[in-house]
Amino acid sequence: METFNINRNIAHLAILQRIELASPKLKKIRKLFGRYLFTKFFSKYFINVSNISNKYYDLMYTEFSSIKSYLKDNQKILSIGSGIGGLELLIYNNFKNSEINFIEKNYISKKIKYGWDDKNIEAYNDIHLLEKFLILNGVQKDKFDIYDFDKSVLPQKKFDLILSLYSLDFHYNFKIYQRYLKEISHDNTFIIFDTIRYEHFKKIFKEVIIIKEDKFTVHKSKRILCKFMK
């Protein structure tokens, strides 16, 4: 069985980022005791690390499959809000010459709120755990760069592919990054992200293609590929 190499701290962070990794019992505990205790205690100590690793691999492989046709060797890739980096690890493993930069927030909000954040202040990531996950799974440190959104000067080079699955415009308003993304894009840059307002982006991009659609979730989001920002 394919899986990732993770420890308890990484597994804990993965559950905060992807609640679908939690067992039915743990989800019931969250409802019973509330999200604060779930975040601080239950989601760290009431988990099976091996099971989470297996489920996380399967989930990331599904995500990888949804974008695989837009990947190729020697791409310069920017990932915004990657979580612990499982998707990016699969890209590395399948396209060895990829160059990936990460933009992340580096803190976990005291009370995780799953929903729209127009001010870009909600976050649940740890840059050190992202780095540790990649290294534990065989990625050399000189093969990636991680930028703290709140403290770093963001990369200014041109990217071939920009990824932000279930982050940009799913949790955070696209306008936060809109000007920056235009600066770092060239004529053939693909920008892939999830949104609940697909029609809105026809006003921003000349080309908008739906590559995946979640019809049975609460938000009924669409994964779109965009090109040629106006």
Image (cartoon, grey):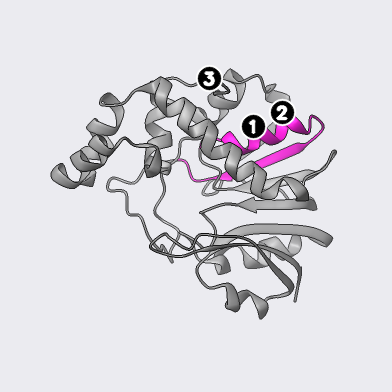
Amino acid marked by disc 3: Asn
Start and end of the magenta stretch? 84-106
Q: Magenta stretch containing residue 87, yes or no?
A: yes
Residue at 79% x, 58% y is: 189
Q: Magenta stretch containing residue 68, yes or no?
A: no
Residue where numbered disc 2 is placed: 93
Picture quarter containing residue 225?
Answer: bottom right
What is the CA distance from the residue labelled 1 to the residue labelled 2?
A: 6 Å
Q: Is residue 107 above or below residue 130?
A: below
> 156 and 44: which one is in front?
44
Between disc 1 and disc 3, whose residue precedes?
3
- Helix, strand or loop at mark 1: helix
**Residue 12 percent coordinates (x, y):** 37, 30
- Helix, strand or loop at mark 3: loop
Residue at 25% x, 36% y is: 26
Residue 216 seen in render: yes
* Disc 3 crowd, CA 10 A, few/some/many (<14, 14-19, 20+): some
Q: Is residue 107 above or below residue 12?
A: below
Amino acid marked by disc 2: Asn
Quick check: marks 2 and 3 in contact, CB under 8 Å? no
**Residue 148 percent coordinates (x, y):** 55, 43
What is the CA distance from the residue labelled 2 to the residue labelled 3?
A: 14 Å
**Residue 129 percent coordinates (x, y):** 49, 28
Where's the N terminus, which quadrant?
Answer: top right
The disc label shown at residue 89, or none = 1
* Disc 2 crowd, CA 10 A, few/some/many (<14, 14-19, 20+): some
Quick check: marks 1 and 2 in contact, CB under 8 Å? yes
The disc label shown at residue 5, or none = 3
Q: Is residue 7 above or below residue 56?
A: above
Between disc 2 and disc 3, whose residue precedes?
3
